[in-house]
Image (cartoon, rainbow, N blue to C red):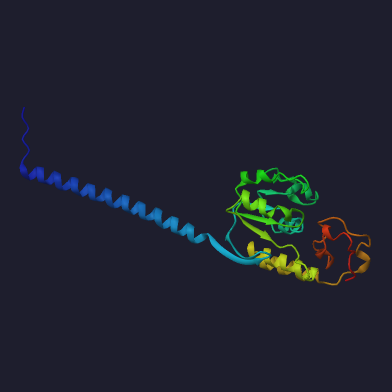
Amino acid sequence: MKVVIRKDAMASIKLRAAALLSIATLSLTACGSSTDTAAEANADDAKKVSFTDNDGEKNVSVPATSIVATDNRTFETLDSWGIKLSAAAVTLMPDTISYTKDKDILDLGSHKEPNLESVVTVDPDLIINGQRYAQYADKFKELAPEATIVSLDPRDGEPLDAELERQVTTMGEIFAKQDEAKSLLTSSKQPKSASRLPTTPMTPSWAWSLRGRAWLLSAEDRTHRWPNV
């Protein structure tokens, strides 16, 4: 049996096909537009913070996605602020710091025998470097060229307390913890009873935290004694 399709029916079929094709095209365009908008929104979410450290003015994208900490003056502060680390000099930390119990943190080891090359496995975008690890800054730049390396060791000729206050303030800016940094510094300046302070030379690197102005000294200042505040 031969089927005959009338011209007007054929024209109707063509019109419907064209309409469906137009709808499909518009849908794909809308989908692509939505994807582009989402990508732009994500790009806007990645903000930059400018700060000045020992090397000059730097920028870092925030929030950082992979953070490395090797400056043992900063460990307890970062821990108290709830900063998640991907790698750190965990070997240098006292067991009172929660990072020592976090198995997901890559231990870079002691400054005497560091495992620097392993830092590439965490692809860091921010490295808080200094003190015992300060000598390895150039190596970190080589291993993690895309990372922002922060150097806030006390500068020669500058008051030690002011320099370490600078460190806390700058970290507060980097991690959006300005209020916490201000609170920490305010607490450090509150008068403390001299009887509550140890009189032996301080040796632990973590003793500077939240114990009056004495917290401004660290393990590198082993000849210092706790000041009377």
x, y percentage for residue 53?
67, 65
Q: In front: 7, or 145?
A: 145
Residue 60 screen position, x and y as percent: 59, 60
The front one of 38 and 200 is 200
Residue 17 relative to residue 178: left or right: left
Give the residue at x 17% y 46%: 16
Locate residue 225: give its quadrant: bottom right
Residue 39 sits in which quadrant?
A: bottom left
Image location (x, y in percent) of residue 192: 87, 69
Q: Compared with residue 27, is residue 61 higher up or lower down, i.e. above or below?
A: below
Quadrant containing the N terminus is top left
Quarter of the image for residue 206 reads bottom right
- Seen in the image, is 19 located left or right of residue 184? left
Q: Position of residue 74 (x, y in %)?
A: 74, 58
Q: Depth check: 140 or 122 in front?
A: 140
Evaluate whether residue 82 shows in this view: no
User: Residue drawn at (15%, 48%), measured in percent from left and top?
Assistant: 15
Left or right of 60 in this view: 209: right
Residue 39 appears anywhere in the view: yes
Asked whether 218 or 36 is in front, the reply is 218
The residue that appears at 49% across and 61% down in the rendered structure is: 44
